[in-house]
Amino acid sequence: MVDWLTMTIQMVSLGVAVWCLVSFFQDRPMLVPHLIGMGVLWLLVLGQVGAAVATMVGGDRPDELPMLISYLATIALLPPACAVWGFMERSKWGPAVIAFACFVLPVLLVRIEQLWSPVV
């Protein structure tokens, strides 16, 4: 895992979550700028997943490899799935879906770091 990338993902994720909560409380639907924010977040996540896979291919693997792989798959699929769901929901609840996903993502990254830490 790349530590600076993990921190960047967590900060961007929390920033997008707050932005979407502001839209939710202002009764606004999800718009294209929200999608762009989720796209940037997804690219960062894919970079982290790619770095983790490259490290595992290089031979460093945690003891709970299946659990780590499931977490990596979850963080890779969460942003696009919630972005589609949020965009399809044309009410104020669209940004709420995105905010929920963006609050869950940092928690998943902390758990991945916990699984990965015995390797280091």
Image (cartoon, rainbow, N blue to C red):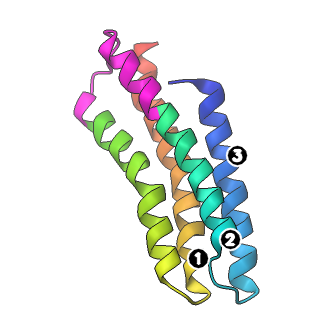
The overriding secondary structure of the stretch rendered in magenta is: helix
Looking at marks 1 and 2 on the same chain, the residue that comes earlier in the sequence is marked by 2
Location of mark 1 (residue)? 96
Q: Residue furthest front?
A: 32
- Tell me the number on the disc at residue 20: 2
Magenta stretch? 49-66
Image coords of residue 97 (percent x, y): 52, 73
Residue shown at 64%/84% (left/top)? Answer: 29
Say whether residue 50 is magenta: yes
User: Disc 2 marks which amino acid?
Assistant: Cys
Location of mark 3 (residue)? 11
Image coords of residue 91 (percent x, y): 58, 90
Mark 2 neighbour density, 10 Å: few (under 14) some (14–19) many (20 or more): many
* Side of 119 relative to 95 (left or right): left
User: Disc 3 marks which amino acid?
Assistant: Met
Labelled pair 1, 3 in contact (Cβ < 8 Å)? no
User: Disc 1 marks which amino acid?
Assistant: Ala
Q: Is 15 rendered above or below residue 5?
A: below
